[in-house]
Amino acid sequence: MTYKIIGDSCLDLTQELKQDPHFQTIPLTLQVGEQRVTDDESFDQQAFLELVRNSAECPRTACPSPERFKEAYACGADYIFVITLSGHLSGSYNAAMVARQLYEEEGHAGQKIAVIDSLSASCGELNVALRIRELCEQGLPFEEIVEQAERYRDSMHTYFVLETLDFLRKNGRLTGLQAFFATALNIKPLMGADRGVIIKLDQARGIRRALERMVPVALSECADPASRRLIIAHCNNRPRAELVREMFQKAAAFKEILITETAGVATLYAGDGGIIVTV
């Protein structure tokens, strides 16, 4: 049995995983004003952050076309698993589903394709993808892999702390007044996700305290840390990600802790210095 794990470009793979032929990402397009940036291996994070800083317009994303996903399905693998960012944030899931229908209508009945909404983003997608890889390596049947992967997704929690609330405000996630007071008082909210919808969990003055607050909140929702993989994604701040790793390591023992860097989509949402955690 051969398998392929395909993600949209919010699947923030580590450098090592980018070399693994089992993984492939399909790029979204980022738009800042009149400029369009493809979220692929050519993405320049520093240049993009500068572009966003210098633009008065809110950056936007455009999901891949169904054709891009359909081309990826023709990889020859027996099992194909597609992981997309939350359907509340992007149309990637719908595009991948349309692509599957078109592909199967063309007569490719020998392959099995599952499209899974991660109900998350960034390291949340990666956490689900790595669970799928584990299940594939165990040689489990396709249907069981999908069932266990979705169960894993439903037990997973995503948290994030951002330097700025501008992107959330501009995208209608916060009122302008809330964003103003949070910025003026240096209040940093601890955010989470409820079935893919962004929610506020807590807040603290200063990003260090907000990150410290994230640890007990996450552990309160994690029944057995020793059986879980914790993934930390950072936007342009590796030392901060390593600090978060140390905080969690002091609080509990996990099966594995990984650090990865945000590609274009998660950079757009998290902003410079943002931290995202899934467990």
Image (cartoon, rainbow, N blue to C red):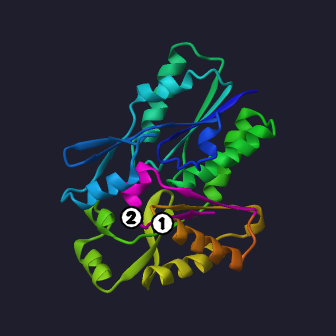
Residue at the (42%, 25%) spot, across then down: 67
Given the current orientation, which residue lies at the most extreme right position?
138
Mark 2 sits on what residue?
Answer: 272
Residue 100: percent from the left, percent from the top? 51, 27
Residue at the (56%, 13%) spot, across then down: 107
Return the residue nearer the eye: 70 or 256.
256
Can residue 135 be seen here? yes
Q: Which mark is residue 136?
A: none
Disc 2 marks a residue whose amino acid type is Asp
Residue at the (48%, 25%) spot, across then down: 70
Q: For this view, does 192 lie left or right of residue 186?
A: right
The residues bearing labels 1 and 2 have C-alpha atoms spaced at a distance of 8 Å
Disc 1 marks a residue whose amino acid type is Asn
Q: For this view, does 248 lie left or right of residue 98?
A: right
Among the 4 quarters of the image, the one containing residue 65: top left
Q: Which residue range is magenta in the image? A: 255-279
Q: Are marks 1 and 2 in contact (CB under 8 Å)?
A: yes
Badge 1 crowding class, 10 Å Cα cut-off, few under 14, some 14 to 19, many 20 or more, is some
Residue 264 part of the magenta segment: yes
Residue at the (54%, 70%) spot, across then down: 239
Secondary-structure class at tag 2:
loop
